[in-house]
Image: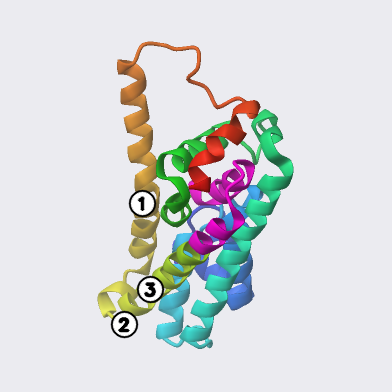
Amino acid sequence: MMTLALGPSWMDPDTLLNQFGIYGLMLVVFAESGLLIGFFLPGDSLLFTAGLLITTDKLDFPLWAACVLVAIAAVLGDQAGYLFGKKVGPSLFNRPDSRFFKQENVAKAHEFFEKHGPKSLVLARFVPIVRTFTPIIAGVSGMRYRSFLAFNVIGGVLWGVGVTLLGAVLGKHAIVRDNIEAMLVLIVLISVLPVIVEFLRARRKARRAPSRGDDGPPAPQDTASRGRHARR
């Protein structure tokens, strides 16, 4: 089955699964869930494609086992992100931009975390880029580990198992199997929609609000106090 390569050919979900199988999927999920370099990986479309390929017998692997392994990889990925944030701390906000790191991504994740509190660990799973940086911000902000672990497991299961099962359920329908390229594009568009909406809202808010000197990313010394939301 040939699918549209969403970006470089090695990032095409069909190509990744055919070459590396479920264990390659686990690696991608782990990296996208909490490693700084993983924000660009195609997690949503990859999970959906995995479910579809399994239900159509093009990927020889039990669906239940795939769901379990994906959930474990997602939880461990966030765990790694949290520990990294806890170790790096406020210095993350002073890190210079590079090809794979942008301060604006950290700022967006921090704002998301401050707005939604601990439940952001669940909500962020469904928002590309933000889901990579949110567990790191949770560690930077000093979120209680017990609370983090609970929301981490809930979010990892809902996202990893949910999107995989969605692909398995929809993959049973011929209209989906015959238009897999369009479905992958649709999955990507749906996954980035929250980012687009938030970007447009931020632009509209910035135009209306008077310029202030404190609108930038929070200073490193403020991150500890901002983590009080996470200790509730």
Q: Secondary structure at mark 1?
A: helix
Give left or right: position of 198 versus 39. Answer: left
The residue shown at (57%, 51%) is 135
Residue drawn at 52 percent across, 61 percent down: 152
User: Who comes first in sequence, dot 3 or dot 1?
Assistant: 3
Could you tell me what secondary structure mostly forms the magenta stretch? helix
Q: Is residue 173 left or right of residue 93?
A: left
Frontmost residue, 84 versus 206 = 84
| x and y percentages locating residue 226 in the rendered image | 54, 34
Find out whether the residues at labels 2 and 3 contact each other: C-beta distance under 8 Å: no
Q: Which residue position is annotated with label 3?
A: 167
Q: Amino acid at mark 3?
A: Gly
Q: Quadrant of the N terminus?
A: bottom left
Residue annotated with mark 2: 172
Residue 62 numbered tag? none
Marks 3 and 1: CB-CB under 8 Å? no
Residue at 57% across / 77% down in the picture? 69
Percent coordinates x, y for residue 18 in the rendering: 57, 75
Viewer can see residue 79: yes
Q: Residue at x 41, y 11 (%)?
A: 211
Residue at the spot of label 1: 189
Q: Which residues are magenta?
A: 129-152
When asked about the image quadrant of residue 220, the answer is top right
Q: Could you tell me residue 145's position as x and y percent?
A: 61, 56
Q: Residue furthest right?
A: 87
Q: Earlier in the sequence, mark 2 or mark 3?
A: 3
Distance of label 2 from label 3 (alpha carbons)? 9 Å
Quote the CA–CA distance across marks 3 and 1.
Answer: 16 Å
Label 3 sits on a secondary structure element that is helix
* Residue 157 highlighted magenta (yes or no): no
